Amino acid sequence: MEKLSDLPNVGKVLEANLLRVGIETPEQLRSIGAEETFIRIRNYVDSGACLHMLYGIQGAISNIPDKYLSEDTKQKLKKFYKSL
C-alpha cells in the first residue's frame, strides 16, 4: 500500500502535518486536493505555512517534484495563496 512518505515532496514535516489534519493516505490527499489540504494545515497545524508547502502538496498529488509543476499551475496556486 502506498504511504504518504512515498509521494514526491512529502518529508517528515509535511507528512506529520497531513496526519495531524486527518489525511492518512495518498488517496485521501488526492480526493481532498491541494487547496483544501493547505487550508486545513494553515488553520489547525501551522498558521505560517508557506507557498512552497502548497507547491509541495500539489506536486505530491500530481506525483511530481514541485520544481516540475507547470507555470500555469504555480500561478493558480499563487493566486489562491494570496487570497487567504
Image (cartoon, rainbow, N blue to C red):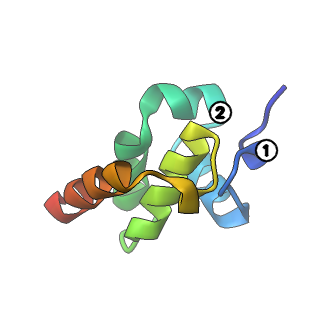
Q: Residue furthest bottom?
A: 48
- Compared with 43, 48 (above or below) is below
Where on the picture, by quarter, is residue 23?
Answer: top right
Looking at the picture, which amino acid does disc 2 mark?
Answer: Pro
Residue occupying the point 65% across, 33% down? 26
Viewer-proximal residue, 48 or 73?
73
Viewer-proximal residue, 4 or 45?
4
The quarter of the rendered structure image containing the N terminus is top right
Residue 16: where, in percent of width, then height?
A: 65, 57
Residue matched to label 2: 26
Q: Residue furthest left?
A: 83
- Compared with 57, 48 (above or below) is below
| Dot 1: element | helix
Mark 2 nearby-residue class (10 Å; few <14, some 14–19, many ≥20): some
- Compared with 31, 57 (above or below) is below
Q: Are marks 1 and 2 in contact (CB under 8 Å)?
A: yes
Where on the picture, by quarter, is residue 61?
Answer: top right
| Dot 2: element | helix
Residue matched to label 1: 6
Residue 34: where, in percent of width, then height?
A: 42, 43
Residue 37: where, in percent of width, then height?
A: 43, 44
Residue occupying the point 28% across, 57% down? 75
Where on the picture, by quarter, is residue 9?
Answer: bottom right
Q: Earlier in the sequence, mark 1 or mark 2?
A: 1
